[in-house]
Image: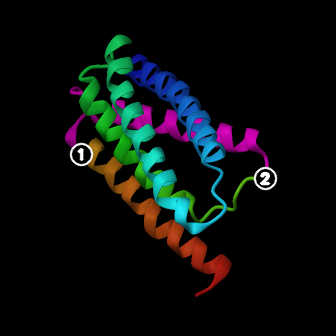
Amino acid sequence: MRGRMGRAAAVCAVLGVLWWASVRLAWTGVGCEEWGCLPPALGLVVAISLALLAGFALALERVGVRPGRRVALVAAGVLVVLRLAGESLPSWTSPLADLAAAAAAFAGAGALAAFMTEPGVARWWKVVAALGLAALLPVALAASLARYGL
């Protein structure tokens, strides 16, 4: 199980770096200076993210983390929760710190997805992991309200 989680974390970290670089290039290429260009820019980010999700499934299958599609979908769900919870954190001033944070988030999502889709793990451990992940959202909201107020 640890090998499966490690492989999933490594693949997802590499794909996280690729996602970060692709999105950064897309935002730079669009050169958004006004609100009118926001929908095409966001559409491009969504297209990149969906293409990378398909790449997750293929890459995970390639390294023996099966079923790759299910692990990729769970990892995508974990990434959504981590992204929402990360909104309460201060923004990074360094692109390298932002890159490291993206790689760490993707690696954590991959490892957690591999754990949650492992057939040998007891169901109650999966429930505990899902509840812990879901608990991040109210904790992040409370931290944000404590920092910035209403």
Closer to the camera: disc 2 or disc 1? 2
In the rendered image, the quadrant that contains the N terminus is top left
Instruction: State which tag comes first along the sequence, 2 or 1.
Output: 2
Residue at point 43% right, 50% down? 43
Amino acid at dot 1: Trp
Q: Within 10 angstroms of label 1, few (less than 14), some, or many (20 or more) residues?
A: few
Amino acid at dot 2: Thr
Magenta stretch bounds: 94-123
At mark 2, the secondary structure is loop
Magenta stretch encompasses residue 95:
yes
Mark 2 lies on residue: 93
User: Is 74 on the left-hand or right-hand side of 36?
Assistant: left
Mark 1 lies on residue: 124
Q: Where is residue 29 in the image (x, y as percent from the top left)?
A: 63, 42
Give the vertical position of 21 relative to 90 (above or below): above
In the rendered image, the quadrant that contains the C terminus is bottom right
Q: Residue furthest bottom?
A: 150
